Image (cartoon, rainbow, N blue to C red):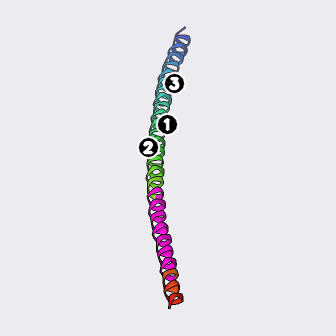
Amino acid sequence: AEALAQKHSDSDKTSSRLEVILNNMEKEIKSLEDDVEKEKLRRQKLLEESNEQVQQTEKELGSLISKEKDRNERKFQRIKMKDVMLELTCVVREKKNNAK
């Protein structure tokens, strides 16, 4: 009877130790799951910030491109005006030369 009681006692101790180990493992798993969730949120936030930066950069580039197009259009118009003035000057000179 005493040996049987000892076996029960050993079995209870082993069972108790296994429960402690199991509880610790469950806590560790929960902690790891929490860490994974935090990392997912961190990465999501970084992705959103990165996307916002990309959108801002695209907007700024669009604005710069638009300004450059306007500037080039004004240059082109000035060059066209100079061409017209040069042609008129040539026509006037030609008429003066023909009039002589």
Query: Which residue does the numbered mark 3 point to in the structure image?
Result: 22
Q: Could you say whether the residue bearing mark 2 is in a helix, strand or loop? A: helix
Q: Earlier in the sequence, mark 1 or mark 2?
A: 1
Specify the amino acid type for callout 1: Lys
For the residue pair 35 and 22, the one nearer the viewer reads as: 35
Question: Is most of the magenta stretch helix, strand or loop?
Answer: helix
* Magenta segment includes 80: yes
Say if 75 sits above or below 100 in the image. above
Q: Earlier in the sequence, mark 1 or mark 3?
A: 3
Counting from the top left corner in percent of width and height, residue 6 is at 51, 15
Say if 89 sits above or below 1 in the image. below
User: Dot 2: few (<14), some (14–19), or many (≥20) neighbours within 10 Å?
Assistant: few
Query: Which residue does the numbered mark 1 point to in the structure image?
Result: 40
Specify the amino acid type for callout 3: Leu
Mark 1 vs mark 2: in front: 2
Say if 13 sits above or below 96 in the image. above
Q: Which residues are magenta?
A: 65-90
Q: How many marks?
A: 3
Q: Could you say whether the residue bearing mark 3 is in a helix, strand or loop? A: helix
Counting from the top left corner in percent of width and height, residue 7 is at 55, 15
Q: Residue furthest bottom?
A: 100
* Magenta segment includes 46: no
